[in-house]
Image: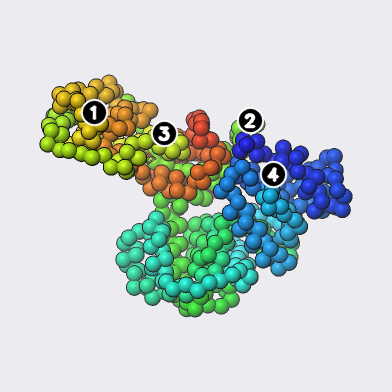
Amino acid sequence: MSGQFRIGPFVRDHGTYIARFATKSRSAPDRLSVTEISESSDCLSFRLEFPEKPVVVTAWNTAQPDTSRAFERDLACLKLLNETGLTPRLLGHSGEMRLLIREDSRGQSLNSILTAGNCDEIAHSLGQWLRGFHEKMPQKEADSAWFKYLKNYPDLLDPEEYEREEAFLRSLRIETQAIARNDPSNAGFMRLKSGALCADSFARATYKPVGWDLLLAARDLIRQFPGQTDQIIAGLLAGWGSDVAAMSPADFIRLTKLFCIATAFRRYAGSEPLLRRYANAWNAQRTKDQRKVTTVIAVPYKSDKQHPPSPDALREFESHLRKIADETNDQSHTITPDEKRNAETPAPILGAICSACRGRCCQHGFENHAYLTGGSLSRWRADNPDITVENLCRKYLAYLPAQHTENSCLYHIATGCALPRDMRADICNRYLCYQARHATEQMPPSSSTDILIVAQENGKPMRASITDMSENYPVEAEILIKTTIPS
Ligand code: SF4
Ligand code: SF4
């Protein structure tokens, strides 16, 4: 079903239903101009040019259970904001079809008009819009502090940042939470002819401390114009028009800088504008039968150059192996459910991610003897109690490949690890680098959209592939290279 969730078939099947909300007639015209806004296996968004009134349709895939929450959040916010001018008017909806039909606001997308020269003025408009949105949304009491709140997101701030700012963050109380738009990107905003802003996607809306949306809006602008951090924050605050949740302006500015600077330019999150450029570069040159990508994941890179292991390295490894194999006579090892689970085949997205990277994390497996210990061998021996120590060693030695990846573990080959998962050290089965962990946490399990995976070294795309979770195919990293130079 997810494979058939495309704009064309959807309009053919439901055009007449949609026409009821857009025209006085009960039938759709024979020919209708359709403009794609976005298309994924979860959600379609498109513009339909009815002669009387163009409309924008968002349809969530009913075959994907995860989409019902997104639809409900979207609908609830659109209803609360209807007729405020903050969002296009809702013309109709269907819960059964997870379908929303809105007026076409005919604005310019914020990203298309955003420049270094107007980013403070746009920050002001965003502050105003977010204030208007906040005033229409439900609120509830809370009893927390920003220190505790941000600690729930260990990837947002490093432990040193918490330590350094602990007293300040503890002093910032959170006494109210309100529904926030909670979108890390300002890309969904449009500027109307009147100059006012308008937004129409609320699929991530949820309760957050008051001011959360200002932090996200600031971060997205500061990523693009880091030299104008002060002006951007000042613009947002001026647009909001009063203190944010009883914080003094000075405290809010300090919180925003801490949040933005710590999260906007670090690791995976820091490269998001670049990832958008990768997606644009791929989408611009793809062939007709290749689908658009909307998700890009940046991962580490390891060269897959192979060479034979040196005799010294082999000798050292064998001596380590004999030592730890002997230890298995004295160790009884009960396999924990976690170890068993870790040894199972990983999720397809992880397979695709690690295969694009080619195993950067395995490079320290060389000096650490594949991380194998008496415990790891005892674990395998517990499942194979009849094997002798000698045969146990032979078994492990037999899996050593004739060639291994240069400067990496002796079991590391171009296609991954030559050792079966149940024979590897538990750390090999459970370790995930930040990028892999982040990507798997962010990726909806049901997503089957095409995903572009880019392995980067020093900010340069070195290798790329596309996955739809069931199949991966490599693509030329060359086509992405020009996008690493910001325009
Ligand atoms: S966990 Fe990270 S470093 Fe290791 S292979 Fe996967 S992507 Fe590469
Ligand atoms: S044993 Fe396999 S997974 Fe572990 S470090 Fe070596 S190549 Fe990587």
Query: Does the numbered disc 2 mark a residue whose Cβ is under 8 Å from ligand 1?
Result: no
- The residue at 72%/54% (across/down) is 93
The residue that appears at 50% across and 50% down in the rendered structure is 272
Horizontal placement of 124 versus 319: left or right?
right
How dense is the environment of label 3, judged by Cα within 10 Å: few (below 14), some, or many (20 and up)? Answer: some
For the N terminus, give its image quadrant. Answer: top right
Mark nearer the viewer, 3 or 1? 1
Of mark 3 and mark 1, the one earlier in the sequence is 3
Colouring used for the render? rainbow
- Amino acid type at mark 4: Glu
Residue type at tag 1? Asn
- The residue at which mark 3 appears reads as 355
Q: Secondary structure at mark 1?
A: loop
Mark 2: few/some/many CA within 10 Å (<14, 14-19, 20+):
few
Q: Residues within 10 Å of mark 1 (few under 14, many from 20)?
A: few
The reply to whether dot 4 and dot 1 touch (C-beta < 8 Å) is no
Q: Position of residue 112 (x, y in %)?
A: 64, 53
Q: Quadrant of ligand 2?
A: top left
Q: Earlier in the sequence, mark 3 or mark 4?
A: 4
Q: Residues within 10 Å of mark 4 (few under 14, many from 20)?
A: some
Q: Nearer the viewer, residue 96 or 267?
A: 96
Residue at mark 2: 289
Q: Is residue 416 above or below residue 270?
A: above
The answer to whether marks 3 and 1 mark residues whose Cβ atoms lie closer than 8 Å is no
Residue located beneath label 4 in the image: 36
Left or right of 145 on screen, residue 176? right
Residue 53: horizontal and vertical position, in percent?
82, 53
Indicate the amino acid at tag 2: Asp
The residues tagged by marks 1 and 2 sit, at their Cα atoms, a distance apart of 49 Å
Disc 3 from disc 4: Cα separation: 32 Å
